Amino acid sequence: MTAEKAKQEAAPPEAAKRRYTPKLLIVAGASAGLLLVGVAGAALWLWPKAPDAAEAKAARLAARRAAVPASAPAALPAPTPVAAAASAAEAAEPQPSPAVVAEASLERLQRRLGEVLGPKGAIEAGRSGELRLLTRSSSVAPVRDVGNKAAAEPTSTQDGRPTQAATPRTGPWSYSGLGGPQAWGRLKPEFSQCAAGRRQSPIDIRDGIALDLEPVQFDYQPSGFSVIDNGHTVQVNLAPGNSIEVNGKRYALQQFHFHRPSEERINGRQFEMDAHLVHKDAEGRLAVVAVLLERGAAQPLLQTVWNNLPLEKNEEFAARAPIDLNQLLPTDRRYYTYMGSLTTPPCSEGVLWLVMQQPVPMSAQQIDIFSRLYPMNARPIQQAAGRMIKQSN
């Protein structure tokens, strides 16, 4: 035995303890550090999410259940008073049902989708557990409200083809816009001939057969009259006693009115205005005398009518002085004749037309007065469709 070994064996126990104490402290410190890191990680993992308290509570409950191993003994150590109080308080709180949790999740999804879509779409809650995505396309034009239900009907099918009008539209007729001549036949059932008729007026009078036609016998007397602006034209109503005779039939004058420009055309020529003198026989059949009006000298009868224009539409104004319609007729009484229709709705057919060949002059000022009321109130030209047109030699 050496001297050094003998000294170590002879050393007291306190010296041995001093040699092993630093190693124990290092091991104990490392173990404590690992324990703190584990506790902190578990705390962060189990920490509830701020946006949804119900979901955080459910997560905490699940974490507590998962912390107990399946093989744990039935007898557990008694909880501390603080833990027991916390468990009792938590058990007393109402627990969220699965429906509530699902509803909260849908609300978050709805908000998130709304943020992503922005102005391009919208999210709408439907039935339970359902979200509907509503998108807006810039290629679809909004429906404009024009005061007519038919205007809101779709104008094309899903494959882009135009639809056909299935039901008549309702509304007033006019010379332009939605109620214009192209739509007259669809406005009301009684207007159907405006679209389906085959002998419509006016026409472009061409290739008339020149014949020795019997002159029209005009029996016009000075008569009282009244003027009304009916919303489509200026109309003059006359007292009874004026008539014409043609082809052995007598027609009583009912009223006359004006169109600008002329509805009738002669070999393609259109005039400034025309006057339509409407007559009816005893059986209700109509005969219309059309007088073409062109720019020239002032017309006395027309000036008398203009002097008695009413201040309001659809209010009839009775004139004091009479008028003599012979002043409106041309000196040359030759005419064209054909069978046609009314040129305004309901476009009834079977009307005898007598169009005077010679136009009558009226002044530019007189034309301008009517133009301020009705700059355009003429129906477009209709197809002659092979109808016979006669003209006086």
Image (cartoon, grey):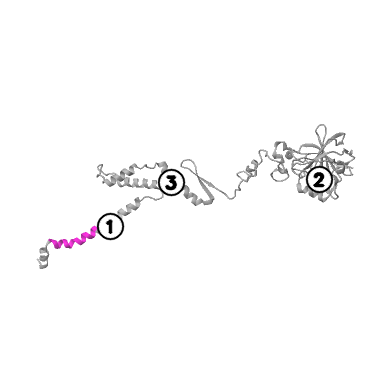
Residue flagged by tag 1: what amino acid is it?
Gly
Q: Looking at the image, which residue is at 33% across and 42% down? A: 91
- Nearer-the-camera pick, 77 or 349: 77
* Rendered-image quadrant of the C terminus: top right
**Does 29 sit left or right of 337 as displayed?**
left
Secondary structure state at the residue bearing disc 3? helix
Which sits in the foreground, 285 or 167? 285
Q: Nearer the viewer, residue 302 or 58?
A: 302
Is residue 382 rendered to the left or right of residue 111? right
The Cα–Cα distance between marks 1 and 2, rounded to whole angstroms, is: 113 Å
Residue at the disc numbered 3:
105
Q: Position of residue 182 (x, y in %)?
A: 72, 43
2 or 3: mark nearer the eye: 2
Task: Look at the magenta stretch and give its main secondary structure.
Answer: helix
Q: Which residues are magenta?
A: 13-28
Identify the residue under disc 1.
33
Residue 290 visible in image = yes
Determine the CA span between mark 2 and mark 3: 80 Å
- Gap in angstroms between the C-alphas marked 3 and 1: 39 Å
**Mark 3 or 1, nearer chain start:** 1
| Dot 2 amino acid type | Asn
x, y percent for residue 25: 22, 60
* Mark closer to the chain start, 2 or 3: 3
- Give the quadrant of residue 316: top right
Q: Residue at x 86, y 34 (%)?
A: 249
Would residue 206 be seen by someone viewing this image from the given angle?
no
Side of 139 where 184 appears, left or right:
right
Q: Earlier in the sequence, mark 1 or mark 2?
A: 1
Q: Does residue 15 show up magenta in the picture?
A: yes
Q: Dot 2 corresponds to which residue?
A: 307
Q: Around disc 1, counting alpha carbons within 10 Å, would you say few (fewer than 14), some (14 to 19), or many (20 or more)?
A: few
Residue at 83 percent of width and 38 percent of height: 224
